[in-house]
């Protein structure tokens, strides 16, 4: 019995101690892209249906029918604060992690400072066959074809030195080799302040 009381006291104290930590984990801003036209903080503002959901996209930097990149403008950032960004990256089609057809995904400030560069992708195929994806999160219709997609949580930090008068512009861009076979989208963006 005594052990249970001690345990309960410990759990109660732990719960109280966790409350301030949880408050610090509340995002400064979130974007879920559930409507056809997304928040004005983004340019362009089109979303795309993926399963029952919508995501910001699609993008392809070599296909004129799609936007090549998106820019997020973050405002009202307190002085001296850096910003942690978390989002779900959605790779549509089989992005290549190396070789002649290697692709990359880069996040940078509008001023050109690189914040994140991805060159390894979760897009695996059996025998290199587009119709035999491995560990994909589902299929999405792009034009006339269903293509496999893979999701990946990504994070990066915008240092306070890149933020001017509380504002920063962040550019997300994929550098693809496949004009009709590779695309991307993003979802569930969360911004956290570090003071
Ligand atoms: Ca490629």
Image (cartoon, helix red, strand yellow):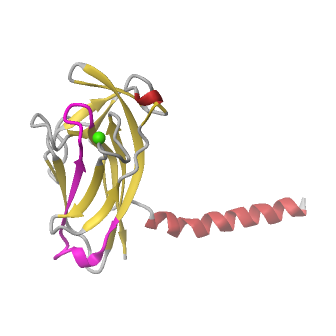
Question: Which residue is nearer to you in this view: 150 or 34?
Answer: 150
- Residue 5 falls in image quadrant: bottom right
With respect to residue 21, does 104 lie above or below? above
Question: How far across and how far down the image is residue 17, in percent?
Answer: 60, 70
| Position of residue 145 measured from the top left corner of the image (x, y, whole percent) | 27, 20
The residue shown at (29%, 42%) is 101
**Relative to residue 171, is residue 183 depicted above or below?**
above
Extent of the magenta region: 157-182
- Is 40 above or below relative to 134? below
Where is the C terminus found, in terms of image quarters? bottom left
Number of residue marks = 0
> Which sits in the foreground, 82 or 11?
82
Image quarter in which the N terminus is found: bottom right
The residue lying at 89 percent from left, 63 percent from top is 2
Closer to us: 103 or 75: 103
Residue 134 showing in the rendered view? yes
Would residue 155 appear left or right of 45 to someone viewing this image? right
Judged from this view, the residue extending furthest toward the top is 144
Figure quadrant, ligand 1: top left
Residue reaching furthest right?
1
Of residues 173 and 176, which is closer to you in this image?
176
Q: Residue at x 23, y 37 (%)?
A: 178
Q: Position of residue 122 (x, y in %)?
A: 43, 42
168 falls in the magenta region: yes
Q: Note whether residue 32 is visible.
A: no
Farthest residue in the left direction?
A: 64
Examine the image and state in which quarter residue 144 appears. Answer: top left
Place of residue 42 in the rendered image (x, y in percent of width and height, measured from the top left): 17, 51
- Residue 155: say if magenta: no
């Amino acid at each position: 019995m005594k052990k249970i009381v001690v345990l309960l006291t410990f759990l109660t104290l732990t719960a109280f101690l966790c409350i301030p930590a949880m408050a610090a984990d509340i995002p400064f801003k979130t974007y879920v892209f559930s409507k056809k036209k997304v928040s004005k903080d983004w340019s362009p503002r089109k979303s795309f249906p993926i399963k029952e959901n919508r995501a910001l996209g699609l993008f392809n930097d070599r296909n004129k029918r799609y936007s090549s990149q998106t820019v997020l403008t973050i405002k009202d950032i307190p002085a001296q604060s850096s910003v942690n960004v978390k989002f779900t990256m959605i790779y549509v089609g089989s992005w290549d992690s190396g070789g002649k057809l290697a692709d990359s995904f880069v996040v940078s400030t509008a001023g050109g400072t690189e914040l994140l560069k991805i060159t390894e992708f979760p897009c695996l195929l059996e025998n290199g066959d587009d119709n035999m994806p491995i560990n994909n999160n589902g299929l999405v219709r792009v034009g006339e074809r269903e293509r496999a997609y893979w999701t990946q949580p990504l994070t990066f930090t915008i240092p306070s030195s890149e933020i001017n008068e509380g504002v920063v512009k962040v550019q997300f861009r994929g550098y693809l080799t496949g004009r009709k076979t590779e695309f991307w989208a993003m979802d569930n963006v969360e911004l956290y302040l570090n003071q």
